[in-house]
Image (tube, rainbow, N blue to C red):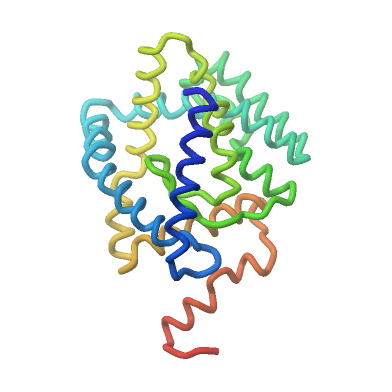
Amino acid sequence: MKIAGFLKTSRLAFVAAAFLASCANAPPEDPFERYNRAMFSLNEKLDATVAKPVAKAYVAVTPAPVRTWVGNFFGNLNDPWISLNNLLQGKPADALSDLMRFLVNSTMGIGGLLDIATEARLPKHDEDFGQTLGVWGFHDGPYVMLPFFGPRTLRDALAFPLDRTFDDSWHFVSDIATRNSLTMLQLASDRARVLGLERTLDEATLDKYRYSRDFYLQQRRFKVYDGDPPVEYENFDLDDDQTETTGETQ
């Protein structure tokens, strides 16, 4: 899909969010909560009726080793973009490691089907342009639930078109049928990896939306700071949780 298409989708989402936020009563980190909850519910229904059944069918007909190869293949295509973002974040050693991963797995790993690089002690990193903007000092911004694509901060949503386009080089495949087939295969592979987690999430909280939101925000901040966020991030939402638990206001 072209970058312009993603930008158009993002703009529409932000316009709708701004309109709905005008009558919402939400905490500062989630001023679009009314819109976000509605979109979260829609995404949940789409997942239950489309993504989850497809993932279950994929698991049923695909042997575990083949699923591992598929995951390795798509993961290998991510490494050049990860390498570039590490470089933009001022981590040249990690950038070189990611580039070497791609070269090793693309050759010795039979096009990335085998993860030879990990065995060669070249660890896989997880970087994207949203994290790069965070390292450059751009604030998270409000929490936004995108249709189909799920949770983002405003900063990550603005970076999403680039991440989506360059994260996997197969997006540039000219043949539409091949590109669509690869898209569906990746979606099935990604969803299959988290089958069963929804039961844990349902049992963990009465408010699935809030639990998912807080987990996402903390995870993103953790990634931006490479596992060592400032104290104010480590204490994110702590007072609210304590208030709900004890019934007291500090």
Asked if residue 31 can be seen in this view, the reply is yes
58 or 120: which is nearer to us? 58
Query: Residue 16: x, y in percent?
Result: 44, 49
9 or 152: which is nearer to us? 9
167 or 20: which is nearer to us? 20
In this view, 10 is above or below 115: below
The image quadrant of residue 228 is bottom right
Q: Residue at x 34, y 55 (%)?
A: 38
Q: Residue at x 42, y 41 (%)?
A: 149
The image quadrant of residue 86 is top right
Asked if residue 76 can be seen in this view, the reply is no
Q: Residue at x 49, y 18 (%)?
A: 170
180 or 62: which is nearer to us? 180
Image-based side of 215 in relation to 120, left or right: left
In this view, 137 is above or below 3: below
The mark tally for this picture is 0
Query: Residue 7: x, y in percent?
Result: 53, 34
Query: Residue 108: x, y in percent?
Result: 56, 15
The image quadrant of residue 107 is top right
The quadrant of the rendering that contains the C terminus is bottom right
Q: Residue at x 27, y 26 (%)?
A: 62
Query: Residue 181: x, y in percent?
Result: 35, 18
In this view, 90 is above or below 29: above
Image-based side of 218 in relation to 196, left or right: right
